[in-house]
């Protein structure tokens, strides 16, 4: 099912700025037993990113009602929300009266093997580099060409994720995930002040780390630092946490810190679903 501005349809105006220029942003939300998981965090990030792009924020109650309507009969699924700047003429200038387009769509949940979360995945470094843009850093906007180009670099089914660095060779993220690593029981991740997507799951994991009084350091680092880590894991709102067991020819174990964070995340999701009833 697809709702466009509240109407069930799959047609959108060809002069919508989301189609013309990627002028918009999106959220991807896990659905469990008809309930959107971490909905509050997703809607907060959506509103924050709308402000950063100067797109009028959607009416949250209206959007929430549409999300609940579209997912109410789903055991497990994915809801995708797209907000664009709406219809506009040819050229980059924004329309004087912005009327955003709101898309809420329901999709099957991807079937990933349990081994990805239990035993870890294989990853590789990508040749594609992320450009630097502090104005857009962190925002989950519709312009995802860098990730698309990076993901096109491999078709080996034994590789589940690609790791992308910026033009200064700082490790930033995966093609569809954020990255954390552990060294001597301290957790590290990229700063994301100049590039990358600040994922909702990244924020949830940061909150869990703070709640349980572990140490987190956000910094710029190169791939040799990552390869010397004790543990490495990736995350997003759909997969949760996947440990990395191998990056190219370097192997890692599924360590205690990663396993503990996985357990805390499961409990947090369960609590969110209970609170949503």
Image (spheres, rainbow, N blue to C red):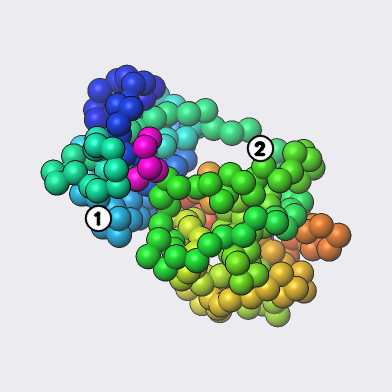
Element under label 1?
loop
Counting the numbered discs, the total is 2
**Is 135 left, or right, of 249 in this rendering?**
left
Q: As drawn, is 122 to the left or to the right of 82?
A: right
Residue nearest the observer in this picture, 228 or 257: 228
What residue sits 30% from the left and 59% below the top?
52
Q: How far across and how far down the image is residue 181, in percent? A: 66, 68
Q: Nearer the viewer, residue 141 or 32?
A: 141
| Image mark for residue 112 | 2
Look at the image and say whether residue 21 sits in the magenta stretch.
yes
Task: State which quadrant residue 81 falls in.
Answer: top left
**Cα distance, mark 1 to mark 2?**
36 Å
Name the image quarter holding the N terminus: top left
Q: Is residue 234 visible?
A: no
Q: Is residue 86 above or below residue 50?
A: above
Q: Residue furthest front?
A: 91
Residue at the image position 41 percent from the left and 57 percent from the top: 139
Residue 219's spot in the image, x, y percent?
A: 56, 77
**Numbered mark located on residue 54 in the image:** 1
Mark 1 Cα within 10 Å, few/some/many (few <14, many 20+)? few
First along the sequence among labels 1 and 2 = 1
Please give the range of residues in magenta: 19-24
């Amino acid at each position: 099912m697809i709702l466009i501005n509240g109407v069930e349809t799959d047609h959108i105006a060809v002069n919508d700025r989301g189609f013309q220029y990627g002028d918009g942003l999106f959220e991807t939300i896990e659905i469990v037993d008809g309930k959107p998981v971490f909905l509050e965090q997703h809607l907060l990030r959506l509103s924050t990113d709308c402000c950063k792009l100067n797109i009028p924020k959607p009416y949250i109650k209206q959007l929430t009602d549409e999300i609940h309507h579209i997912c109410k009969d789903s055991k497990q699924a994915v809801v995708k929300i797209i907000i664009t700047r709406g219809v506009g003429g040819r050229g980059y200038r924004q329309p004087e009266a912005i009327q955003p387009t709101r898309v809420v769509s329901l999709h099957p949940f991807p079937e990933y093997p349990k081994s990805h979360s239990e035993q870890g995945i294989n990853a590789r470094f990508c040749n594609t580099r992320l450009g630097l843009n502090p104005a857009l850093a962190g925002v989950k906007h519709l312009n995802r060409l860098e990730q698309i180009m990076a993901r096109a670099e491999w078709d080996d089914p034994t590789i589940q994720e690609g790791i992308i660095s910026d033009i200064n060779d700082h490790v930033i993220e995966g093609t569809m995930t954020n990255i954390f690593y552990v060294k001597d029981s301290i957790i590290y991740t990229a700063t994301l002040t100049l590039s990358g997507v600040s994922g909702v799951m990244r924020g949830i994991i940061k909150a869990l780390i703070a709640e349980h009084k572990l140490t987190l350091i956000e910094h710029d680092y190169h791939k040799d630092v990552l390869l010397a880590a004790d543990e490495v894991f990736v995350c997003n709102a759909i997969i949760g946490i996947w440990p990395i067991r191998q990056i190219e020819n370097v192997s890692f174990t599924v360590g205690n810190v990663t396993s503990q964070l996985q357990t805390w995340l499961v409990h947090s999701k369960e609590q969110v679903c209970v609170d949503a009833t």
